Amino acid sequence: MEIKEKNVTLKNGKAALIRPLMMEDAPTALALLQQAPAELPYLLREPGEMKEDSVHEVHMIGEHSDSPNHIQLGAFLDGELVGMVTLERMGEYRKIRHRGKFSILLKKAAWGVGLGKSMMSAIIEAAPTIEIDQIELRCMSSNQRAIGLYEKMGFRTWGILPRANRRTNGCTEDETCMVLAL
């Protein structure tokens, strides 16, 4: 499967590149995954929960670059990796192989210029290349900024999972479950 890179012009006039991540991007992607929880409170991981030399994460990036079951794209601004978006099959069984699990990460410094929307558009456009026609996601219910973007992209809420996330301070938060049929 080949997914072409895309050059996009952002709201601020800057150019960004969205392209599949490759094995050589793994160290930079790993660094982004390690740094992101400190500035992005809506991620699943909290600061310090990822090992510094996570071989698993590096392997995942290599696997995504070749897999018929995964797509992982990186967003680059001024040559720097500032975001990643992933779509992966729910499983290999015939009854569920059409469903894809979506996740996105974008540095806060890159918010508000249309890059998140461009990343989502690119992954939605690429979904048929791995035979996915339904994209599913879950996010913390208080992340209204993300939910608003997902709704603009056509996602609809199908349910709320109460107390799905527990923060380090002990407080719990509901999770909003959304779906997009392609």
Image (cartoon, rainbow, N blue to C red):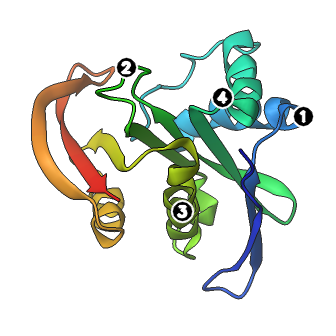
**Which is nearer the N-term, disc 2 or disc 4?**
4
**Which is nearer the N-term, disc 3 or disc 4?**
4
Residue tagged 1: 24
Residue pictured at 83% horizontal, 30% vertical: 27
Indicate whether 93 appears above or below 3: above
Residue pictured at 29% horizontal, 56% vertical: 181
- The residue closer to the viewer here, 147 or 62, is 62
- How many numbered circles are shown? 4
Disc 2 versus disc 4: nearer the observer = 2
Residue tagged 3: 125
Residue tagged 2: 93
Residue tagged 4: 34
Find the residue positioned furthest to the front.
Answer: 94
Label 3: how many Cα within 10 Å (few below 14, some 14–19, many 20+): few
Report the Cα–Cα distance between label 3 and label 2. 23 Å
Q: Quadrant of residue 49?
A: top right
